[in-house]
Amino acid sequence: MPVEELQSIIESEELNVKNEKVVWECVLRWINHDVDNRKGHIVGLLKGVRLGLLDAKFFKEEVSKHPYVTENEACKPVILETSAFLRDVQMMTKEDKDFVIARIARSGIPRDILFAIGGCRYGTLTDVIETYDIRANRWSVLEQVDSIGPRAYHGSAVVGFEIYVIGGYDGGSEGLNTCHCFNAATKTWREVAPMHERRFTLIVAVLRGEVYAMGGFSGNLLLNKAERYECKTNQWSLIAPMKTAHCNASVAVLSDKIYVAGGCDIYNTHLKTVEVYDPDTSFATFS
């Protein structure tokens, strides 16, 4: 394989490997096949490896001290940049929300990302969005995104590349009935149709591509009302209510049914009941 082809592969945003150590070992295998003619390419290939994703100890002992690297003076700036980055990562605290991920630590795609949107931060409502990169094993703040305002105790649902932030609490006397949609590909927000009821600490699930909002607290009442959002028509419709008004429950979807487990009732009693919603029969069954 010519060096240009190998360089193109390891730099590709679509390269999907378990970890960047695999890429480094691939580079070494390629060079070892014809050491005299290939070791001079180590500088360019080293820049193609996402060195910031490597374990700090592995980078220090296996990469920075490798003979191909130490014998080539042109590798020194790359090693110094990566060493400084890994040192900064180790010293970073949870307060360092403005930390920017360097190019050497950005994962390629496809990749899995977790989003943490809003909530309470040091006792204050926040609108900060943080993302966790599964491959990089690192949290970072999502920058340059419009704000929908600080909120907590909301529900969230994922349909395709879109994340729905539903209801919640913004510090007022009542819960919110608003619903905002964040497109993870374009990093843009849009407001969609509001719910029929104001809710926070609500229960949210996705079934057959539709979003369900159940229970929760309005600010005045604990709710048993439930409703369904159809993404294509941008419309909420009421469905059969839950047997018990409650909030803060866990929810799971299994075999085309929604299971709502536990939570608290109007007396703030912790529940051990499970409610099951079957969309085909349009009413809830309970066990």
Image (cartoon, rainbow, N blue to C red):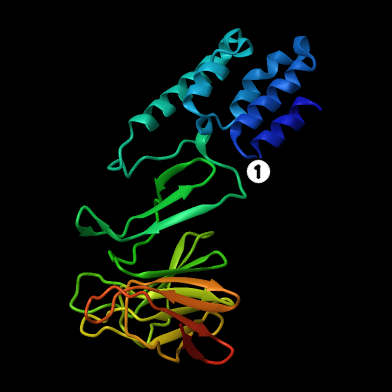
In the picture of the structure, the residue carrying the numbered disc 1 is 16
Q: Looking at the image, how many numbered discs can be counted on the residues? A: 1
Q: Provide residue 284's location: percent of width, then percent of height.
A: 48, 88
Amino acid type, mark 1: Asn
Nearer to the camera, 229 or 71 = 229
Q: Is residue 209 left or right of residue 5?
A: left
Is residue 194 left or right of 46 when viewed as pictured? left
Res 212 visible: yes
Residue 76 lies, with reference to residue 119, above or below; the image says above
Residue placed most toward the observer, 264 or 194? 264
Instruction: Report the residue at 41% width, 24% height from top.
Output: 84
Q: Give the x, y percent position of residue 17.
A: 65, 40
Q: Taking the image as drawn, is residue 234 in sight?
A: no
Rendered residue at 48%/76% (across/down): 259
Q: Position of residue 101 (x, y in %)?
A: 44, 39
Q: Residue at position x 30%, y 61% from top?
A: 119
Instruction: Indicate the quadrant where residue 38 lies.
Output: top right
Q: Residue furthest top?
A: 71
